[in-house]
Amino acid sequence: DIQMTQSPSSLSASVGDRVTITCRASQSINTYLNWYQQKPGKAPKLLIYATLSLQSGVPSRFSGRGSGTDFTLTINSLQSEDFATYYCQQSFSTPLTFGGGTKVEIK
Amino acid sequence: EVQLLESGGGLVQPGGSLRLSCAASGFTFNYYAMTWVRQAPGKGLEWVSIVSGNGGDTYYGDSVKGRFTISRDNPKSTVYLQMNSLRAGDTAIYYCAKVLGHCTSTSCSGYFDYWGQGTLVTVSS
């Protein structure tokens, strides 16, 4: 099974900050990497698929990059509505696996 | 508008069974694989199972293999999760999601573009 490791597990940031979250796969997954945002009490929401493609309706301040085993999600100019938990997910092979999550909190 | 509505959650004793349903609308149901993802209280997301568009291919996470069965009824636009031999560790919110991806005879993968609001399963005596 492919293990997905996210870092950090949590971070504190201010509105306007640039935030970067890292996701590492235990083996190469090409660019089969997706990112989700989850707010408390809500279902996850797809942000980015295939490493860098923005889901429809997602603001352009979100961006993704990477390939192989190392990936990043960057939020430029953090907004108040971006405080949430973010998960990566590999879609290279079953079993499909998620990272442990990164909680972005208000500083 | 795509909508996914889960039902069937509740309180069940260890060793018991439960069947979850997810009614879909707003898209051509049989064109897409469907998946179940769960989230234990205060924990992260865990993928549970996936079924191909025609229902012929199914795959499971290691923690539920042999106990859970995913199926679908395309005329009813509904996907199911039959959960047997339930354990305390199965306590979670269960989400169904629509999958954008592909399935073969050996794998079924993709990403999840629409999610339901979830149904809570509590396994406790």
Image: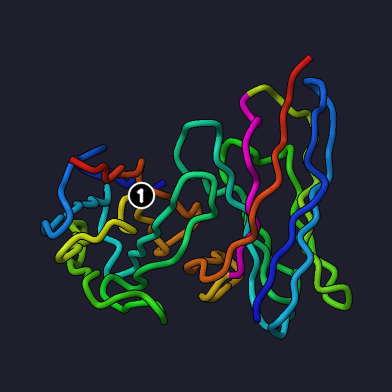
Which residue appears at 71% of the width and 85% of the height?
Answer: B28
The chain under label 1 reads A
Residue B61 appears left or right of A19: right
The foreground one among B33 and A37 is: A37
Residue A56 appears left or right of B33: left
Q: Is residue B86 above or below residue B58?
A: above
Q: Position of residue B60 (x, y in %)?
A: 62, 49
Residue type, numbered disc 1: Ala
Q: Position of residue B23 (x, y in %)?
A: 79, 65
The foreground one among A89 and B116 is: B116
**Quadrant location of the N terminus of chain B in the rendered image:** bottom right
**Quadrant location of the C terminus of chain B in the rendered image:** top right
Q: Is residue A37 above or below residue B25?
A: above
The foreground one among B4 and A69 is: B4
Q: Which residues are magenta?
A: B89-98
Q: Position of residue A22 (x, y in %)?
A: 19, 52
The residue wearing badge 1 is A84
